[in-house]
């Protein structure tokens, strides 16, 4: 059941459960940076596709799980930290023979997906703090909400702002930035949605 009022995200509940509240601030900072690092690591597990400039990566699942675990504010902060590292020139974006690392990646074809990450984590985190991550079906809903934000950002960017876009290319944007990924991402989402209910059961069983 989802809650009519906010409940603590998984990390905060874990701090209370383990009695680590006195170390809450450094643990939260470390966890936020860890999720940012996981997002960067997931970008390296990418598969370039010959028919689209958008690679296949595991990053969206890290973004969504990070939002659910950390909550909306820290989940969002983790993705801003990830983007900041990329803008600073660290090689944290998915490898591409055509798209550069650094700030230029954010104005390339994949910029809309990347810039949507913080807001996807925010949406999933907000739903998690309503208890959506406690049961499998509602966990799917929470993650689907975040994934919808990523796709909306990516397809909108490809349609309106990416190099070569003319504002009339929605069908082309869907063909290169949505249709090739939606089935695989839906499968990954359904698998990732199992993580939070299992984690909550484990926490409550101790």
Image: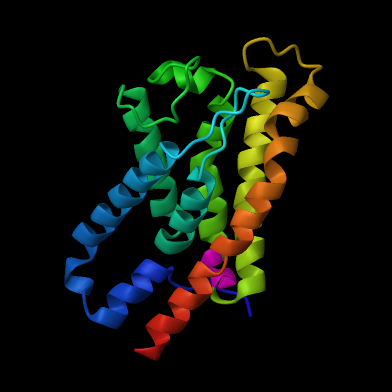
Which quarter of the picture shows residue 155?
A: top right
Q: Residue at the spot x=63%, y=32% of the render?
A: 154
Residue closest to the eye, 24 or 137: 137
Which quarter of the picture shows residue 116?
A: top right
Residue closest to the eye, 200 or 182: 182
Outermost residue toward the bottom in this view: 205
Location of the C terminus by quadrant is bottom left
Query: Is 109 drawn above or below residue 197 in the view shown?
Result: above
Query: Is 116 drawn above or below residue 50 in the view shown?
Result: below
Q: Residue at the spot x=41%, y=82% of the render?
A: 202
Give how far across and how far down residue 134 sits, in percent.
54, 76
Magenta range is: 128-133
Q: Residue at the spot x=78%, y=22% of the render?
A: 172
Query: Is 38 drawn above or below residue 129 in the view shown?
Result: above
Give how far across and how far down residue 47 sits, in percent.
53, 34
Q: Is residue 206 left or right of residue 97?
A: left
Query: Is 200 drawn above or below residue 169 in the view shown?
Result: below
Which quarter of the picture shows residue 161?
A: top right
| Residue 5 within the segment the image draws in magenta | no
Q: Is residue 176 left or right of residue 199?
A: right
């Amino acid at each position: 059941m989802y809650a009519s009022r906010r409940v603590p995200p998984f990390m905060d509940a874990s701090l209370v459960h383990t009695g680590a509240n006195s170390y809450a601030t450094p643990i939260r900072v470390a966890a936020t940076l860890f999720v940012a690092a996981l997002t960067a690591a997931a970008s390296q597990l990418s598969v370039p596709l010959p028919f689209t400039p958008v690679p296949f990566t595991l990053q969206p699942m890290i973004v969504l799980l990070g939002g659910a675990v950390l909550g909306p504010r820290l989940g969002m902060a983790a993705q801003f930290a990830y983007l900041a590292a990329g803008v600073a020139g660290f090689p944290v974006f998915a490898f591409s023979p055509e798209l550069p690392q650094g700030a230029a990646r954010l104005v390339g074809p994949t910029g809309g997906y990347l810039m949507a990450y913080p807001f996807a984590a925010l949406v999933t985190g907000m739903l998690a703090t309503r208890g959506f991550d406690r049961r499998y079906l509602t966990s799917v809903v929470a993650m689907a909400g975040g994934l919808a934000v990523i796709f909306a950002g990516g397809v909108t960017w490809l349609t309106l702002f990416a190099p070569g876009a003319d504002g009339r290319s929605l069908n082309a944007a869907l063909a290169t930035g949505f249709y090739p990924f939606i089935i695989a991402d839906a499968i990954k989402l359904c698998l990732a949605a199992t993580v939070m209910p299992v984690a909550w059961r484990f926490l409550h069983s101790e």
